[in-house]
Image (cartoon, rainbow, N blue to C red):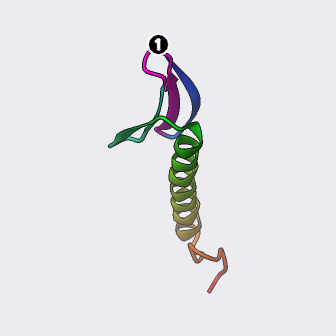
Amino acid sequence: MCVTIARWRGISMQYCQDSGKYIVTTKNTSKEYDNPLEAWSSYMTTMDIAGRRYIGNMLFKQGKNRYTGGND
């Protein structure tokens, strides 16, 4: 049985009780970890990248700089 620890926009982190492994899944990949800190770090890095891309795209659509949010 796998329990979802966190999920956002197609990115998730689960703990599988049967195998004792943590699994980080994106839309295209899935990776297993023995160490929960490694799994969490991977999940947060993936979330950070996706979040920055999402915000950057929103800013760009508003005619703003995707990296600074400014009107330059």
Question: At which x and y percent is residue 33?
Answer: 45, 37
Check the image and report above or below for 46 versus 31.
Answer: below
Residue lying at the far left in this picture: please name it: 28
Check the image and report above or below for 16 versus 9.
Answer: above
Does residue 17 show up magenta in the picture? yes
Check the image and report above or below for 4 versus 51.
Answer: above
The residue shown at (51%, 40%) is 9
Q: Nearer the viewer, residue 18 or 63?
A: 18
| Quadrant of the image occupied by residue 26 | top left
Question: At which x and y percent is residue 35?
Answer: 53, 38
Question: At which x and y percent is residue 36?
Answer: 57, 37
The residue shown at (58%, 43%) is 40
Residue lying at the far right in this picture: please name it: 70
Q: Secondary structure beneath disc 1?
A: loop
Circle 1 residue: 1
Stretch in magenta = 10-20
Q: How many marks?
A: 1
The residue shown at (59%, 67%) is 59
Label 1: few (<14), some or many (≥20) within 10 Å? Answer: few
Q: Amino acid at mark 1?
A: Met
Q: Nearer the viewer, residue 52 or 15?
A: 15
Q: Nearer the viewer, residue 21 or 71?
A: 21
Does residue 71 show up magenta in the picture? no
Residue lying at the far bottom in this picture: please name it: 72
Q: Nearer the viewer, residue 7 or 54?
A: 7
Quadrant for the C terminus, please.
bottom right
